[in-house]
């Protein structure tokens, strides 16, 4: 009888230990490891996508033309494969823009949209944007592949979306909704983002907490040849000091990248603040950050090709943007306007 009691005691002890070990991984997951999610954004994945997206097959992705149509299906397929839905309707990732909206400058075109619904504040929306178009084929037949402009932004948004989806799959859905917005017609005059903001905002603008816009982040400009660990930020402090401070804090704590604010100067003659898609949100008092590597000798030329992209640097920049988006999406209060 004593032997039976002793054996039962041993079995209970072993069961208790096993149960404890089985439960421990769950307890570890009570707090998200955001840097691990960020590291799912890889140079290899970015390179694999961009060598297709900025290939001759896409014919320079000119708005309304066959190459641009290939581009939107490329983007859609990635969201479908990742299991990230569209906010429009099941399987419908295209926000259609009629030809008349382009005022004779392009045929009908499409924005591409996908989203991850927020867990606690689903009506509040953070937009992560990039333009999907480029300038097409030159008169002499040369294809302008637009690897940096803005293939780098396009594939970065897709990778950032993947990182958020990994977090969701591990039980960490963002508090706020994230809209991944790929806009068309930027090269013709910010038409895609204007259509979203002025004509058909899928989510009300008053509920949009910020826009993080990515336009050219795969190269290094002449100023930073000896220090490529940088990125230009434009607009981060123009509408919200809080957004600027959050952005700075994330970088200093986790990445230590040089944030260059040269083009953020109101007197800068380039006026980049007004020249990419974030502006259509900023004009509606939505805080924005525009991420940019500066111009280079291949800007708007057939020589802007994927072999010239610095993929490890592109991955790091995309990780910075992901982590910033994570903080905006998960803070208790929405970003405040000044």
Image (cartoon, grey):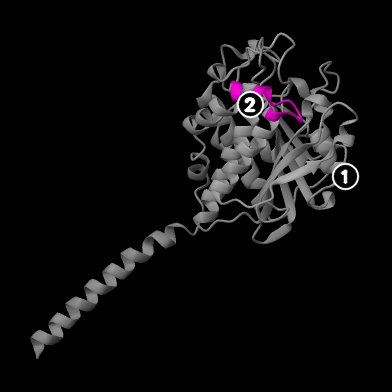
Q: Position of residue 255 (x, y in %)?
A: 55, 33
Classify mark 1: helix, strand or loop: helix
Was residue 63 drawn as part of the magenta stretch in this picture? yes
Circle 1 sits on which residue? 199
Q: Which of 78 and 13 lies nearest the eye of the viewer?
A: 78
Circle 2 sits on which residue? 58
Q: Residues within 10 Å of mark 1 (few under 14, many from 20)?
A: few
Residue drawn at (79%, 47%), measured in percent from left and top? 336
Span of residues in magenta: 56-66
The answer to whether 263 appears left or right of 176 in the picture is right
Q: Position of residue 65 (x, y in %)?
A: 74, 28
Q: What is the number of callouts on the image?
A: 2
Residue drawn at (75%, 11%), measured in percent from left and top? 139
Distance, label 1 to label 2, CA atoms, is 28 Å
Q: Which of 214 and 17 lies nearest the eye of the viewer?
A: 214
Q: Position of residue 225 (x, y in %)?
A: 58, 12
Residue drawn at (67%, 22%), measured in percent from left and top? 60
Residue drawn at (70%, 28%), measured in percent from left and top? 215
Quadrant of the frame with the N terminus:
bottom left
């Amino acid at each position: 009888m004593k032997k039976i009691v002793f054996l039962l005691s041993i079995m209970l002890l072993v069961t208790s230990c096993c149960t404890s070990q089985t439960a421990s991984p769950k307890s570890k997951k009570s707090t998200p490891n955001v840097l691990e999610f960020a590291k799912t954004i890889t140079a290899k994945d970015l390179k694999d996508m961009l060598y297709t997206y900025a290939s001759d097959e896409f014919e320079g992705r000119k708005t309304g033309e066959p190459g641009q149509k290939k581009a939107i299906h490329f983007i859609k397929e990635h969201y479908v494969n990742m299991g990230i839905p569209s906010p429009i309707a099941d399987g419908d990732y295209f926000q259609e823009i009629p030809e008349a909206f382009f005022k004779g400058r392009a045929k009908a075109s499409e924005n591409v949209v996908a989203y991850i619904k927020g867990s606690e504040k689903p009506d509040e929306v953070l937009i992560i944007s990039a333009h999907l178009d480029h300038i097409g084929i030159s008169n002499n037949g040369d294809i302008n592949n637009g690897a940096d402009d803005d293939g780098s932004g396009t594939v970065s948004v897709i990778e950032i979306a993947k990182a958020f989806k990994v977090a969701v799959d591990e039980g960490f859905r963002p508090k706020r909704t994230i809209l991944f917005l790929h806009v068309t017609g930027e090269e013709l005059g910010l038409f895609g983002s204007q259509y979203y903001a002025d004509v058909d905002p899928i989510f009300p603008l008053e509920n949009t907490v910020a826009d993080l816009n990515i336009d050219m982040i795969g190269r290094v400009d002449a100023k930073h040849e000896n220090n490529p660990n940088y990125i230009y930020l434009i607009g981060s402090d123009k509408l919200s000091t809080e957004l600027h401070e959050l952005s700075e804090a994330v970088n200093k704590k986790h990445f230590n990248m040089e944030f260059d604010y040269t083009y953020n100067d109101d007197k800068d003659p380039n006026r980049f603040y007004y020249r990419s898609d974030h502006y259509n949100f900023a004009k509606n008092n939505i805080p924005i950050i525009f991420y940019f590597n500066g111009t280079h000798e291949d800007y708007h030329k057939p020589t802007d090709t994927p072999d010239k992209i610095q993929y490890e640097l592109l991955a790091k920049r995309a990780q910075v943007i992901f982590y910033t988006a994570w903080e905006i999406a998960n803070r208790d209060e929405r970003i405040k306007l000044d």
